[in-house]
Image (tube, rainbow, N blue to C red):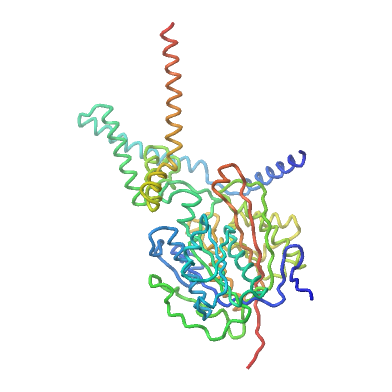
Amino acid sequence: MSDNHSSQQKQKQYEDYVKKITPVHSLGLNMCKAFFTGGIICVLGQFILNYAGKLGLDKETSGSWCSLILILISVILTGCNLYSKIGKFGGAGGLVPITGFANSVAASAIEYKAEGQVFGIGCKIFTIAGPVILYGILCSWILGVIYYIFKFAGGLL
Amino acid sequence: MNRQMTCGASSIAFRNPVFIQSCACVAGQKESEGPLGTCFDIINEDPMFGADTWEAAESTMQKQAATLAVQKAGLQNRDIRLLFAGDLLAQTVASSFGTAGLGIPFYGLFGACSTMGESLSLGSMCIAGGYGSHILCATSSHFASAEKEFRFPLGYGNQRPLSATWTVTGAGACVLGCNPPTRDSAKISGSASDTTSAGNSVRYPGTLRDNNTCAVITGLTTGRLIDFGFKDSFNMGGCMAPAACDTIAQNFKDFNRKPEDYDAIFTGDLGMVGQKILFDLLSEKGFDISSRHQDCGMLIYDPQTQDTHSGGSGCGCAATVLAGHILPNIINGTWKRILFVPTGALLSKVSFNEGDSIPGIAHAVIIEQYQLPNIP
């Protein structure tokens, strides 16, 4: 037991030591880049929204067009091998908006195309995006239940 | 009669030296733009190597290196008794598909990035044991197939940490033999592949011999699996440095040598982070190798201009640097005796996701300059 403990301690010691000597990206600089990249993508989205509004579309339809156009741009950039450069520069700024999600799906589809339409693209297209879809749906379900309970409780009062 | 050639706890000292008859290396474009860009035999600017998939590209590359090494030795495939080859892909497909057409009896290896050390070790043991007069050792790695196997699809936009290494697109091969390489170099007609261009300044287009100078393997130390419980797959240097330390220290102990007994000590792909750890761990054991240590991963790329972060990695890293840089420099006398220690991080995506650590391994091969007696 004590042997196990000391080996765990040794492991922790080594991890701490490696962490200490390993250089890391500058957090401040990375956050600025992420803010800049994510900001530009959002400004682009806002531009599409406003333009759609000007054309007389209602708010919901404008939103759909905005998402669709951003996804299309992202997929085309992924196909041209440009989105990975945006992601490398912008980090979370390129990852978090809808364009990052589209990139992860398109990149998987391109990579696994060689393994076939079913076992390649079909099975592996959501390799990266899958967790987001699964836990996104799960979270909205849980929130829906909570909302329902509060609504029910509110109705009783 | 005592037939044992063992030496210390885990080393072998060969009674007769094992000759490196020829060596060949193939590299991609990024490697050709690095500091060792002029050392490679074949540089292929097409990352697909004329194939349809990344795996097939790596197979093609390994076949090119293997074929070229056999040609340089002035031999035919049927002259090669055994082939030891491996790579990073699951079920080592690059080696099995790449070398299938050669028709040479084949042992497939997996030692992660230490594979060149593993294949040279096994090959030289077979030569010393009398199991063949010519044995081929080959390995390869490809940036794209390794990213696909271990990390993310290429088009995915993510940031690599500064401790990450860049998998070398390259393949290396050596022909080992019990006799010295012949003096008459075979004529290489550039027929290794029609889709490639020969490198610009190949120093040894034929056998690895200059007048009476050859390169020989005189001993080896087989590495143990070393697991410090480290779990960062983007910091392979941290996984492998303890293994490199263990093997190097064991080599000193088994052969009763000091760091000064080697003109240079080459690790495979520790990178900048791993090198620092190796120095610290070895100094705890009382050895200082900093004046003679070089890391193949740090030699192959220029981190300032090539954005490779900690350095190069992959089986092809140690293999191409050995064939393109180290062996020619042993022949021309830059170093008389070196320790070549390719390092491997035995990363499996499955065991890693299941919470297991990444054990490291390193195999040491002693390579020396050898002067043949002057026979008129």
- Front position in the image: B57 or B231: B57
Q: In this rendering, is residue B261 above or below B298? A: below
Judge whether B106 appears above or below B274 on screen.
below
Q: Nearer the viewer, residue B22 or B45?
A: B22
Total number of numbered labels?
0
Q: Residue furthest top?
A: A157
The residue most toward the right is B1
Q: Is residue B351 left or right of residue B253?
A: left
Expressed as whole percent of the image width and height from the top left, the position of residue A149 reads 45, 15
Where residue B293 sits: x, y (%)?
65, 64
Q: Tell me, yes or no, if residue A52 can be seen here.
A: yes
- Residue B312 can be seen, yes or no: no
Check the image and name the residue furthest to the left: A55
Question: What is the quadrant of the N terminus of chain B in the image?
Answer: bottom right
Tell me if residue B83 comes above or below residue A25 in the rendering. below
State the quadrant of the C terminus of chain B.
bottom right
Residue B274: which quarter of the image? bottom right
- Residue B87: percent from left, percent from top: 53, 60
Measured as percent of width and height from the top left, residue B186 is found at 50, 83
Q: Residue at x 48, y 73 (%)?
A: B67
Q: Nearer the viewer, residue A72 or B278?
A: A72
Above or below, B144 against A40 in this view is below
